Amino acid sequence: MLREKKTGINFLVVLLLFFFPFILFSQKRLNESSLKIEVNKEKIKYKEEINFDKAQKFFFEKEWDSTLVYSMKQLTKNNALELNDYCHYFRAVSFLRKKLFKEAKNEFRLVSKKFAFYHNVSFFLGEIALEQNEFKLALGYFNFIEKLPESTYDFKKSDVLQNIGLCYLHLNEFSKAEDYLIENSELHEAQKDTLLLAESYLILANLYYVQYNDNKAIPYFEKAYALSKKIKSFEIKRMAAKNMAAVEENRKNFQAALVYRKEYEIWKDSLNDQNKVWAIADLEKKFAVKQKQKQVDILQAENKVKAAERNGFLASSVLLFILFGTGVYFYRQKIKNNKIILAQKNELDELNATKDKLFSIVSHDLRSSVNALKTSNGKLLENLESKNFSELDVLLHNNSTIANGAYNLLDNLLNWALLQTKQAYFYQESLHLASIVQHVEYNYKPLMLNKNIDFKNDVNTSDYVYADMDSLKIVIRNFLDNAIKFSNENGSISIYSRPSSEEFCYLVIEDSGLGMSKATKEELLKETVLLSKKKNDDIIGTGLGMQLCKSMINKNGGKLEIESEENVGTKIIIALPKFKNNG
């Protein structure tokens, strides 16, 4: 029995070591507001330093490669020490986000201790040490931060407590680890943060389990598993199920362990299903075609049976009347059957043509993007050898634009396939509409700057809608992306609220772009249309974005309207159910 228990413990220790880096590097909650304020002061003070201005801009936009390029340009000049500190800090964080820990550590060590945000440096160095299993070194950094007043640092106290607890756990100082991890868990309970609370319960459970304290460990495993049902994180769901499987195996309850193992595999597969989307979509399409063909065959068979029954009945009547009636009947039946068969054949042909066109356009767009990226990378290598930094900047931005376009295409395809196969996670809740729009807008500002588009956001801050957050973001992102795509240089885009009704809030996305004809608008709003026909053939699109948006708006209980004139612009009006219980 002891050997069996040890086997389970060894398994959980390995599991714990695998799980800790996820906790550390997925939950960074640094508050950038104070850092941004100080950086703006430096930007004004050193307004002639263009490279510093660009480096800080890309840093806060999380464009890590561009941050590395411009911060290095700034460091090659003779700068004030304070600017050097900011540049080394920008570079260190960029390397850290790219999982280049050695380079990040080197840059952090170049930041002077006079740097206003040196406590952030200590925190990051502690996490790198923890990631590299240097637990005593990590503990020194976190103990230094623990002694500081909570108001002086930019991260949550629970982050520091959790990291210290992890250090003591790895050092086998279980009593100290327990004190810190329990305090961390109590903070999360007070904050009612379900995701972080589930994480803290998993750590506490493993702490007790490696000490053979099942009476304390198993309730925490069960709490973590129960909370995992309420969150969207596949990783937490997967780890909670895997831990419960190990617990049941040690209890010799293999039937329950098998159930948890199967659940673990489901969540594991959910993280890897992206590679199966194309195959699933193709199989679903083929299945639909076969089902339609079966319906046609059944309908033809039923029609023949009915014709035979009627002919038998008419045979008992006067021969002349039978001949006349049979002739009329067969003629009309033939026309009717031909119309039904023709309509169904056209529908099947349209489905097949849609599928073929979808694959053709998607493969064409992806091939074009990859080819453009390949060509651009060749130029990038040439300019890297010649150290032509200005051209490198242009090429990096070009690569980013190409990659974003290909990513948006694949993202829409994935979401459409998940929606068609009913695998998409969907949970409606109260959402602050202005915050959702602001979050999406932030990701598209660089694209609007490239086309010099004047953008305005006048969404009513008092509007709360009842919708699924992920699907709402996909809808807003697609329509904003279209507005940018079809807008000319120096155009304008506005997102604002129309007066809401008793049932709905109205969000309007208006652009001054190409617009569309009435026929095109009506075709786009048809439920059966998959591929959208654009007026300009040079602008190729699969139409998946529009189909995806219509499906997701309908699923949220909303409505979609389009107002547009050619060469004037387009208004997309999205009606979303109002959240009525907001106090």
Image: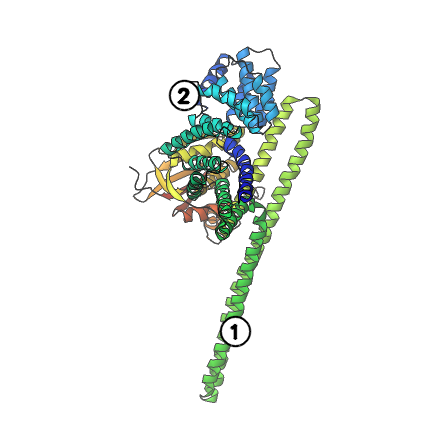
Q: Which mark is residue 274?
A: none
Q: Which residue is mark 1?
A: 301
Can see residue 542?
A: no
- Estimate the x, y position of residue 271 in percent, counting from the top left: 54, 43
- Estimate the x, y position of residue 527 in percent, counting from the top left: 46, 53
Asked if labels 2 and 1 touch by Cβ distance under 8 angstroms, the answer is no
Q: Residue at x 61, y 49 (%)?
A: 360
Farthest residue, direction front: 1
Q: How many numbered marks are there?
A: 2
Can see residue 291?
A: yes
- Estimate the x, y position of residue 66 in percent, counting from the top left: 58, 25
Front residue (pair 331, 91): 91
Q: Which residue is mark 2?
A: 150
- Estimate the x, y position of residue 440 in percent, counting from the top left: 46, 35
Q: Is residue 358 left or right of residue 525?
A: right
Tell me the SS state at disc 1: helix
Front residue (pair 118, 273): 118
The kind of residue on which mark 2 rests is Glu
Pointer 1: residues within 10 angstroms few (<14), some, or many (20+)?
few
Tell me the SS state at disc 2: helix
Pointer 2: residues within 10 angstroms few (<14), some, or many (20+)?
few
Q: Is residue 417 above or below residue 198?
A: below
Quarter where residue 102 is shown? top right
Q: Is residue 544 above or below residue 435?
A: below
Q: Residue at x 35, y 38 (%)?
A: 464
The kind of residue on which mark 1 rests is Ala
Say which quadrant the C terminus sits in. top left
Q: Is residue 394 above or below residue 575?
A: above
N-term-proximal mark, 1 vs 2: 2
Front residue (pair 26, 396): 26
Q: Residue at x 56, y 19 (%)?
A: 108
